[in-house]
Amino acid sequence: MPTPMTVLVIYGSLREKSINKALAMNAQRMAPEGLSIELLGIEGFPLYSDELEKRAFPEIAMRYKDAIRSAAGIIIV
């Protein structure tokens, strides 16, 4: 069986009952065979600070960077 294509869906809301989060979760639920949907929210993502970035690039930002690079496509809701 071939490896499924991965699409990253990033939703930008912190609300538990967010419409954007619900859309992202439905995209994952409705994905056809052969398509893998990976969800990423913004929970824990720090506000931009060049001072923070100079000390050490935030780990969560590195995880997002890796996920974005490895995805075949990206959807932002």
Image (cartoon, rainbow, N blue to C red):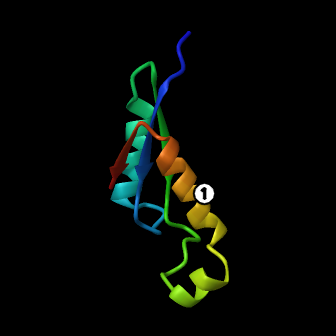
- Residue 64: image x %, image y %? 54, 57
- Residue 33: image x %, image y %? 44, 18
Furthest-front residue in view? Answer: 54
Q: Secondary structure at mark 1?
A: helix
Q: Is residue 7 above or below residue 1?
A: below
Q: In this rendering, does residue 23 appear at all?
A: no
Q: Is residue 77 left or right of residue 6?
A: left
What residue is drawn where x is 53% and y is 49%?
Answer: 67
Q: In this rendering, does residue 49 appear at all?
A: yes
- Residue 49: image x %, image y %? 51, 86
What residue is drawn where x is 47% and y is 40%?
Answer: 71
Tell me if mark 1 has few (under 14), some (14-19) or many (20+) residues whose alpha carbon lies within 10 angstroms of its own.
few
Q: Nearer the viewer, residue 12 or 29?
A: 12
- Residue 5: image x %, image y %? 46, 27
Q: Is residue 59 above or below residue 76?
A: below
Residue 59 falls in image quadrant: bottom right
Q: Is residue 64 left or right of residue 28?
A: right
Q: Is residue 77 left or right of residue 3?
A: left
What residue is drawn where x is 37% and y is 46%?
Answer: 74
Residue indicated by mark 1: 63
Q: Nearer the viewer, residue 72 or 54?
A: 54
> The disc labelled 1 sits on which kind of residue?
Arg
Give the position of the N terminus as an image quadrant: top right
Q: Nearer the viewer, residue 62 or 77?
A: 62
Q: Nearer the viewer, residue 32 or 19?
A: 32
Furthest-top residue in view? Answer: 1
